[in-house]
Amino acid sequence: MKKKIIALTCCRQNSKGIKNKNIKLFSGKPLLYWTAKNTIKSNIFDKIYLSTDGKKIAKLGKKYGYEVPELRPKKLAGNKSDVFETHKYFFKKMNINDKNSLICIINNNPFINSNMIEKSFKIFKKNNYKSIVMGAIKVSSDQIYFRQMKKKKNSLYPFFSKKLVNSGINRKDYNTYFNTGDIRWGKPSWLINYKKFNIILSKKGFRYFEINEMEYQDLNILKDWKEAVLKFKNL
């Protein structure tokens, strides 16, 4: 049986860091418009779903081309809700499983364009759908993990003191990246439990496509939003 290629975007109504983020106007359009546009433009998916607890978001989603089977239960839409539990609920509700589907989780972010989606799918396909695929941004040597600090009272202390002490002064390229998580390709069973997802990453790693930091912005707080507006204008 040929498996369906499915996209799922999850949008909460009461976003915490940026109020009404998912429908807030970004470059003249609601944020969700850009994600829908790029997902559809990629011309990859058999089904494009939106999971939300908000009626306004659902209405916009349908207008932009998403299928919105129902509103998500409120217990899966709180500030501390686990989005992987939402995946699990949605997959079960829609009878999505490893035998019939391959999944791309696409976060509501206007910088995830159709080219990124297409590129990530090619990597997923090239690896016979056996590896998780995500976007990643390279970290400069000045921001390497062992230079991170934790605050204690009025001072900062290194998390990895032994590694920092032995690191020396150099311009070494550590080939270090962090994953953005805004695109996640995988089998449904890989995407229903956050701990198990991270166990897979730890044991098998993941395939990736590199994202230019100047062409991407995470959207968690208002400062991010303001920076994103400026970056988007220059794309």
Image (cartoon, rainbow, N blue to C red):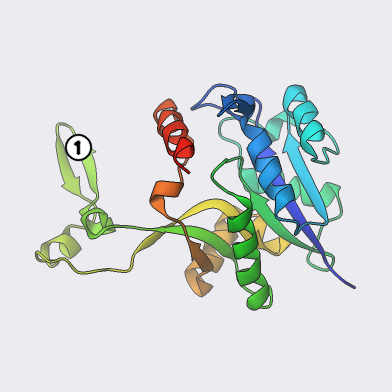
Residue at (68% x, 56% y) in the render: 104
Q: Which residue shows up at 60% across the image and 71% down it?
A: 123
Residue sitting nearer the eye, 39 or 178: 39
Q: Position of residue 162 (x, y in %)?
A: 16, 63
Q: Amino acid at mark 1?
A: Lys
Q: Position of residue 158 (x, y in %)?
A: 19, 51
Quadrant of the rendered structure where residue 50 is? top right
Secondary-structure class at tag 1: strand
In this rendering, would 111 be left or right of 65? left
Q: Write the residue at 75% across / 56% down.
A: 43
Q: Viewer-proximal residue, 211 or 17?
A: 211
Q: Quadrant of the N terminus?
A: bottom right
Tell me if residue 72 can be seen: no
Residue 58 location (% of width, % of height): 77, 30
137 above or below 35?
below
Q: Is residue 20 above or below residue 3?
A: above
The residue nearer to you, when weighing 198 against 207, is 207
For the question of whether residue 84 can be seen, the reply is yes
Q: Residue at image x 24%, y 43%?
A: 150
The relative height of residue 159 versus residue 67 in the rendered view (above or below) is: below
User: Could you tell me residue 106's position as x and y percent?
Assistant: 64, 49
**Is residue 159 found left or right of 133 in the rendered image?**
left
Graded by Cα atoms within 10 Å as few (under 14), some (14 to 19) or many (20 or more), the crowding at tag 1 reads few
Residue under label 1, please give it.
152
